[in-house]
Amino acid sequence: NSHDSQNATVDGNLLAAKSLARFGVSHMFGVVGIPVTSLANSAVSLGIRFIAFHNEQSAGYAASAYGYLTGKPGLLLTVSGPGCVHGLAGLSNAMANTWPLVMISGSCDQKDAGRGDFQELDQIEAVKPFSKFSIKVRKINEIPDCVAQVLDSAVLGRPGGCYLDIPSDVLHQTVSKSEAEGLILAAEKSRKKESVARVEGFEIAKAVSMLREAQRPLIVCGKGAAYAKAENELKKLVDSTGIPFLPTPMGKGLLPDTHELAATAARSLAIGKCDVALVVGARLNWLLHFGEPPKWSKDVKFILVDVSKEEIELRKPHLGLVGDATLVLEMINKEIKDDPFCLGRSHLWVEAITNKAKENVAKMEAQLGKDVVPFNFLTPMRIIRDVIVGMGSPAPVLVSEGANTMDVGRGVLLQTEPRTRLDAGTWGTMGVGLGYCIAAAVASPDRLVVAVEGDSGFGFSAMEVETLVRYQLPVVVIVFNNGGVYGGDRRSPEEITGPYKEDPAPTSFVPCAAYHTLIEAFGGKGYLVGTPDELKSALTESFSARKPAVINVTIDPYAGAESGRLQHKN
Ligand code: ADP
């Protein structure tokens, strides 16, 4: 009766779950255990989908990618101490990529902290270098407000990772049902809203006149623009002005890679010779050679569009526009509409870029056309590309990691729709593959997910193939198996000395490992392939089945290079 329900109590676990559900959380990723199992169960009973992993590291990577794909914070739940430490992988990956994530960890009993409690750790101190905001709940009645604060902080301004610490004693405290309701309502009222800095009209006018007067303009679009869902405004800008564009690896797909103004295949020319570069949602970090010579011309003028003022202050561009990519591009498009300009296909710069791109594509196709067996990296990559292109829309989400596999894949595989590429990212994080696959499958349920990864990248979280099977996610993981990190033993005989010289090389794994049987152990589908026909048939069958599968592709252990294309950093 109503009297009973008035007096029913709500504990900290339930109050946290209620707050999350009320504040819009629909998915959580994590590993349960003391003291948060009941939080996960409560969340499920309130309609939140909880994806339970084997390891917090993978769950954290999943939460970070979920944040990127949906624009809502990815929720990571971990136990205390070691669980929190494993979760730092996901938290830090979210920070490095500027993706919204909220990690919630249980922690030890407050009264026992400092005297060796079960899984004790000063978690607030531990997360500091890896989070933009962190907070510890001291009493149950603070839970709803703290939940609101972390959720808001993760998405407002520059997105990033946030942390909420809930001690086990707080999770077990109780309040009445009506008190819980009041606390949630109060927290809901105090939630923060985005206060986007408004770019001034004269700044937009300046950007447009720089683009108009440029001899060799270029638009660079990054994953910040993809996160901002700026694809329509970007398309308008490129189509109306005829300015070539260059996507960063995860910016690929904002506009189709097959667009005639795509400068991807003429990257060196585009960045080496452009005189004005409009960079939207991409940092001038290592991925863009810091915007400096010799890769860029020393006279290039940068117009940076970024939601983060600090980012713009750090890079000191010719012109910085602080704001949301979609809003800023919309303003630029409006300004251009009043006085349009278009380079046209016979413009010298456009012609130079398109000719160079055509020439490079033709060179690449000549190499790709050959069927090399035992497989190098190119032959299976071309086969995968062609099968994916044949699928049309909705394009699958492509997850890619590994040194050679990711490098070759970035050049060969085509992205035609925004936010359909997830790779090692800003931090060069290896081991993200399975977590990203799971996030993509739950965030974009209409899309197939295809991972193309090296055997070493796969190995980081291979046990999560069980998670794929358990939730029956439409994920096909293609493992490029060349028997190690970079491949076979590349040492010369003189390098192999010392008492452990009989050991396998640090770069090598068991040759011809039967990775496809891992997923079969859980009832998923495994394929072992070594020829073009075998690969084609495995792809066709697994893509149409839309069921968890691992395709183990045997690659020549001596194909590919050490460190992929980053040899100079090794
Ligand atoms: P990439 O790896 O594709 O080069 P980065 O991760 O280096 O991209 O850069 C993404 C940038 O996008 C970050 O500096 C981030 O602050 C910015 N950003 C995030 N959200 C938005 C948004 N809504 N509008 C504009 N910029 C954004």
Image (cartoon, rainbow, N blue to C red):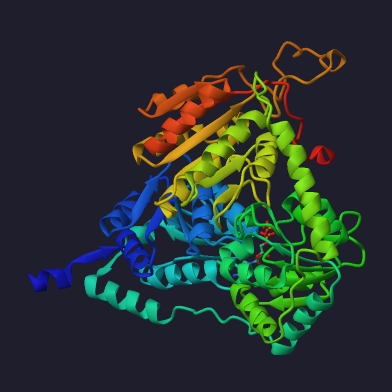
Is there any visible trace of residue 86 in the rendered image?
no
Q: In the current view of this chain or complex, which residue is farthest to the front?
A: 346
Count of labels in the image: 0
What residue lies at 75% left-to-right and 49% top-to-bottom?
265
Picture quarter with ligand 1: bottom right
Q: Above or below — where is 183 with respect to 297?
A: below
Depth check: 51 or 175 in front? 51
Q: Quadrant of the N terminus?
A: bottom left
Residue 46 falls in image quadrant = bottom left
Residue 134 falls in image quadrant = bottom right
Depth check: 418 or 213 in front? 213
Depth check: 426 or 446 in front? 446
Q: Quadrant of the C terminus?
A: top right
Residue 460 falls in image quadrant = top right
Q: In the rendering, at what x and y percent does residue 451 appear?
A: 53, 39
What residue lies at 79% left-to-right and 77% top-to-bottom?
212
Depth check: 170 or 10 in front? 10
Q: In the rendering, at what x and y percent does residue 252 appear?
A: 63, 54
Q: In the rendering, at what x and y percent does residue 235 appear?
A: 62, 67
Q: In the rendering, at what x and y percent does residue 305 appear?
A: 70, 72
Q: In the current view of this chain or complex, which residue is farthest to the left?
A: 1
What residue lies at 57% left-to-right and 54% top-to-bottom?
91
Q: Above or below — where is 252 with respect to 86?
A: below
Q: Above or below — where is 91 with respect to 135?
A: above
